[in-house]
Image (tube, grey):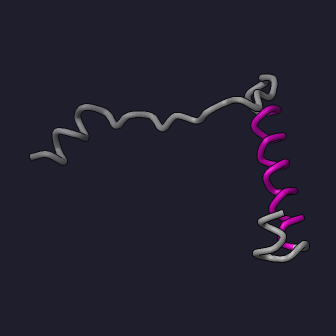
Amino acid sequence: MQLVARVGWQKAAVALANKNARILWAVLAKGRRFDPDHVSVKPEAPAVAMSAVAG
């Protein structure tokens, strides 16, 4: 309801549909079951890229 109060019900409905579509695409593309408790982890940068940034 916070989103509805901030942007209106029409934009909130589109945002929810977009979220559901992205979840559905990921489930179908990866062939896995949906895990509502999944926490996304950003992959670490390769060691080569880190040494180039530090040097």
Q: Is residue 19 above or below residue 30?
A: below
Measuring from the top left, give residue 43's x and y in whole percent.
44, 34
Measuring from the top left, give residue 33's x and y in whole percent.
81, 23
Q: Report the number of discs.
A: 0
Query: Would you say the magenta stretch is mainly helix, strand or loop?
Result: helix
Is 35 on the left or on the right of 49, as rendered? right
- The span picked out in magenta is 11-28
Measuring from the top left, give residue 12's x and y in whole percent.
84, 67
Q: Is residue 8 above or below residue 26?
A: below
Q: Is residue 17 above or below residue 28?
A: below
Measuring from the top left, give residue 10's x and y in whole percent.
90, 73
Q: Nearer the viewer, residue 6 or 16?
A: 6
Q: Residue at x 78, y 76 (%)?
A: 7
Is 5 on the left or on the right of 42, as rendered? right
Q: Is residue 35 above or below residue 14?
A: above
Residue 26: within the magenta? yes
Q: Residue at x 61, y 33 (%)?
A: 39
